[in-house]
Image: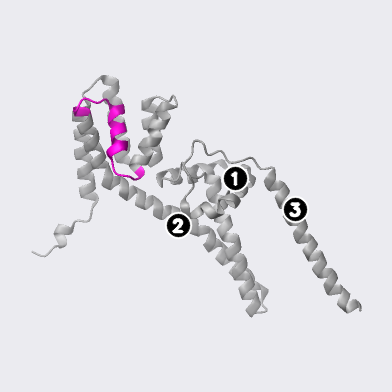
Amino acid sequence: MLDQLIPLLAAGGIGLAVVLALAALRAVVTKLPPEGRSFMDPPPLLLRPIWAPIHWISVLLGPLLPAWLLELLGARMRQAGLGHRMSAAQMVALCLLVAFPLGSLAGAGVLSITDRPSYALSALFGCGLFGGMLPMLWLRERGAATRKEISRGLPFLIDLLTLCVEAGLNIQGAFQQAVLRGPSGILRHEIQQMMRDVRAGKSRAASMADWATRLGDPAVSRLVGALTHAEATGMNLGPVLRRQADSSRAERFHSAPNWRRSAPR
């Protein structure tokens, strides 16, 4: 009789603990502030199915994260085009959300085929660390793709700005035409954000400086510096933009693989 009662009591205790844990989690989640995304773009499509737990973890964990980590991670996210889609705390939450389930499954799987807890613990930490690094690898690859896209699209963007300025538009109108007629991608998206900042009351010079900081590309920084200097001194923007286009195109040419050397003669 007692032997049959003990498993039932144990199962009941585990069930009660699960119910209480879920109730406590629900109470915590309902008290979390809603996410304000009025000045942000939608989150990445891949992360939308799990965005709610990412937000919950980031709100609970965000105040505990060091400022230097948030600043470093935020800079890398801005350069990868994610600065207006998610915060640095949400990226840390994503790492944890991938690490814990993967590590737990690996530890449980090893424990089911061996009676050595040390093996299971090693699998838990190893797979958890690997899972936590997956979002960072994704961020690195996205950053590399963004830099390549900027290098490929910047000469065309400057040519378009040059044509608009020489047709009689000011630089603000030229940027508007670049948004309307330019190809989709990170450059057009960031110009849209720059123009939103201007409409919100920020000066154009400060908005362009923020644009260059977000992208972290030297060619964009030189373009912004040249435009700011030309506007401050009253210079003609057409020749300035043409020099920037030639410089950007030459830089892209020299950074590309020199296929002529390897081509058969």
- Estimate the x, y position of residue 167 in percent, counting from the top left: 19, 28
Disc on res. 23: 3
Question: Which of the 4 image quadrants contains residue 190?
Answer: top left
For label 2, the residue is: 137
In the rendered image, residue 75 lying in the magenta stretch gets the answer no
Dot 3: element: helix
Question: Which of the 4 image quadrants contains residue 205?
Answer: top left
Disc 2 marks a residue whose amino acid type is Leu
User: What's the distance in space between the residues labelled 1 and 3, CA to CA?
Assistant: 26 Å
Task: Tell me the quarter of the image containing the N terminus.
Answer: bottom right
Task: Tell me the quarter of the image containing the C terminus.
Answer: bottom left
Q: Is residue 210 above or below residue 153?
A: above
For label 1, the residue is: 65
- Estimate the x, y position of residue 110 in percent, counting from the top left: 61, 75
The answer to which of marks 2 and 3 sits earlier in the sequence is: 3
**Which color scheme is applied?**
one colour
Question: Which of the 4 image quadrants contains residue 123?
Answer: bottom right
